[in-house]
Each structure stands twice: as C-alpha cells, then as structure tokens.
Image (cartoon, rainbow, N blue to C red):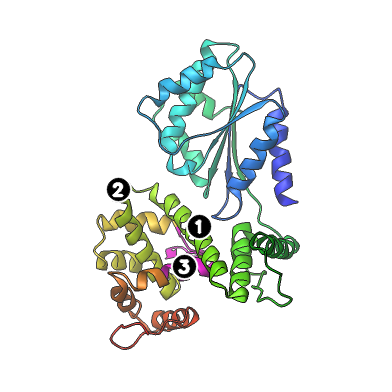
C-alpha cells in the first residue's frame, strides 16, 4: 500500500497538464528500500498514459549533449518523456548538463517534448545544493521555479506489510526453485528496522529457504543473489571514486566493509586509521566517501553494511584473501571490537586462533 501511494502520486504529477514543460523530482531512500522497483512501476504505468520512458545510461559518450538534443528534436510534437536518472547524487554534473540541454531545446521550440526527470538517490540533502553548482542563469531560474518538484522520501514498509512480504517471498522462491515450502522455517525479527526495506526481506526469505533446504543448488542460488546485491552495493559506492582498477577497488571496499562488520561499526577516526593501515590508495578520500555512504545514526560513526548476511558474506570472502589476517588483527584493536568480531565469526562458522589462522 505504501508503494502504491507513491506510484499514484507520481502518475498524478505526470497527468497534470498545468505542470511546466520541464519538471524534476528526487525519489530518495536507503539501499534496498525499493527505489528502482518503484521507478520501474511508474515508468511502466506512464507508458500507458502516452509517456515515453527512458533511463539515463551508466556510461555516456563524449558527445552526449549533441545526441540528447538530436533525440529530443526528432520526437513528434507534443511528445512526453519520462527520464529516470539512477544514482543521481553521484551524477550531479551530468544532471545539470541534462537540465540545461532540455531547457535550451524547449526554449527554441514551442512544440518540443514535455520532459519529467525522475531522479533516484539514497540521500536528499544534496538536492538543495544544486543551485550552488555553476550553471547558466536560466538554469538557476528554473531551479527556483515550480518545475523543481523537490525531494520525496520513499516510505518504509510497516510491520504488517513485512510479514506478508516475507511469506510471499518464501512461496515465490520455493515455486521458482520447484521445491515444497517447509512447514517450519527460521524467521528473522521483522520488527528490526532494516526490514522496513523490501530487499532485505527478500534476502532473508531466500536465506531461510536455502538454509532449510541445504541442497547445493539452492545454496548456490542464494549465493548468486547475495553476490548480485554486493555488486550493486559496490557500484553505488564506486560512483563516488574514480579508479583505473575496478577489481582492486572492489577488494579495497570489501576489505574495509568486512572489517566494519567484524567490529560492529566504528568511528570515522578509526575508519581512517584502518584504511591507512590497509595501505589503500588515496586513503583520506576513500575513508571520507565510505563514511558518507555508510554513516551511522550517531554523528561521527560509520555503520556496517546491512543486512548481516551481506556483510558476513564479505567477511567469508575476504578472510581468505591477501589482507585476511590484517583485517582480523585490526579487529583486535580493543576488547569491545574483538568480542563483537568473535561473535560474528562464530555466526558464520569461522574460528580464529591466536596467530590469526582460520579453522
């Protein structure tokens, strides 16, 4: 019901003919809350209302401005375009270029398409800072107009929706894997706030089913889905850092997040110290980006990746790699951190001897 309300509100804006020719809105929420899925539903329904749906590509050519102009000009008169920009917070310069181009095309042609830009991001604070990015005066004027629809938070699922979603996910996954749904399955504590995010409920359902089935095929499917989400999480983080070696960047990111999971979160100061100890290139910037993306509820704190099954998968992966022993050693920096690390390692059935070896 909460998602349906968001979709209906978005469609109402699209149906409102009194809206300016160019509108932009930010749909925001934490990882796994359902931003992409909600945007897909909005685009799907909007196509039935005469809109042309499009997603901004991840990699853009050098002449993208010219390509955009040519595409918009080639559309029939009175066309309507719904353009989704994912990871918009990490693509602010591209977004501003896009808005400038659309405004120029619309100003030169009264029959140019009506455009609605739907941006997706985890945070919203950056949206009001767009006006401080250097841009032509007419773009500044538009940012202060009613075409800038501002941020809208995607609401979390309530407890009733979580229960229903968990059981639906169990049935769906069991059906896809062609297995009977066991009568008794381990269920997570769905009152935990992380399960306000649909993705985490689906991961928990798949995890419960795989652990119950215990068959290699089902465990493999679970691992594939977990890795897929880890790759998506890394992509979101990587957009804030330019690198010539994506594989090394993944290892650096995974090592730091494995350490954060072991110690149960850390201060920004401890994060910086750990990043330097791991000899990661451009350590200050790396730590700054990581602290920004995984900021904790308390000021100055950095949280581990959620849900646990994602962060614990990173621990299992990175424990046997080049920095594995170093990560364990860094988790021993104080008694609280080491106690937390031992509990996490026990949960994923890894034990560590005094010399750092895994058993």
Q: Residue at x 29, y 67 (%)?
A: 273
Where residue 70 sits: x, y (%)? 47, 17
**Residue 299 lies in the magenta stretch:** yes
- Numbered badge on residue 311: 3
Q: Which residues are magenta?
A: 294-315
Where residue 276 sits: x, y (%)? 26, 64
The residue at which mark 1 appears reads as 229
Marks 3/1 in contact by CB < 8 Å: the verdict is no
Does the image show residue 138?
Answer: no
Where residue 205 sits: x, y (%)? 64, 66
Query: Closest to the observer: 138 or 228?
Result: 228
The residue at which mark 2 appears reads as 243
| Local secondary structure at mark 2 | loop
Q: Is residue 336 above or below residue 189?
A: below
Q: Residues under labels 3 and 1: Cα distance?
A: 11 Å
| Local secondary structure at mark 1 | helix
Q: Residue at x 39, y 69 (%)?
A: 317
**Residue 304 lies in the magenta stretch:** yes
Where residue 283 sits: x, y (%)? 27, 58
Q: Residue at x 31, y 64 (%)?
A: 272
Looking at the rendered structure, the number of numbered marks drawn on it comes to 3
Whether residue 165 sits left or right of residue 93 in the image: it is: right
Q: Residues under labels 3 and 2: Cα distance?
A: 23 Å
Marks 3/2 in contact by CB < 8 Å: the verdict is no
Q: Residues under labels 2 and 1: Cα distance?
A: 21 Å
Q: Which tag, 3 or 1, sits closer to the chain's start?
A: 1
């Amino acid at each position: 019901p909460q998602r349906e309300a968001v979709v209906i509100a978005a469609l109402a804006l699209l149906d409102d003919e009194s809206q300016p020719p160019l509108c932009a809105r930010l749909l925001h929420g934490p990882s796994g809350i359902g931003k992409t899925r909600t945007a897909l539903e909005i685009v799907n329904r909007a196509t039935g209302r005469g809109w042309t749906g499009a997603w901004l590509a991840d990699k853009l050519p050098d002449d993208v401005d010219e390509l955009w102009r040519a595409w918009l000009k080639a559309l029939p008169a009175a066309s309507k375009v719904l353009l989704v920009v994912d990871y918009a917070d990490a693509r602010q310069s591209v977004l501003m270029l896009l808005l400038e181009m659309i405004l120029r095309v619309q100003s030169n042609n009264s029959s140019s398409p009506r455009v609605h830009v739907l941006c997706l991001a985890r945070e919203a604070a950056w949206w009001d800072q767009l006006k401080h990015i250097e841009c032509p005066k007419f773009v500044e004027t538009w940012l202060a107009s009613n075409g800038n629809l501002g941020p809208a938070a995607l609401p979390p699922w309530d407890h009733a929706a979580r229960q229903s979603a968990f059981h639906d996910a169990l049935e769906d996954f069991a059906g896809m894997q062609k297995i009977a749904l066991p009568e008794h399955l381990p269920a997570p504590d769905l009152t935990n706030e992380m399960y306000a995010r649909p993705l985490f409920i689906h991961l928990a359902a798949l995890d419960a089913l795989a652990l119950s089935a215990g068959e290699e095929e089902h465990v493999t499917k679970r691992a594939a889905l977990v890795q897929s989400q880890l790759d998506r999480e890394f992509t979101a983080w990587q957009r804030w850092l330019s690198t010539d070696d994506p594989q090394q960047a993944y290892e650096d990111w995974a090592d730091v997040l494995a350490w954060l999971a072991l110690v149960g979160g850390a201060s920004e100061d401890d994060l910086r110290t750990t990043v330097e100890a791991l000899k990661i290139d451009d350590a200050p910037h790396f730590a700054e980006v990581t602290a920004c993306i995984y900021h904790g509820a308390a000021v100055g704190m950095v949280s581990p990746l959620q849900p646990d099954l994602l962060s614990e998968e990173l621990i299992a992966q990175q424990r046997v790699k080049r920095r594995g022993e170093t990560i364990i050693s860094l988790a021993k920096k104080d008694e609280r951190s080491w106690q937390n690390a031992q509990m996490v390692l026990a949960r994923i059935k890894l034990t560590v001897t005094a010399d750092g070896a895994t058993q």
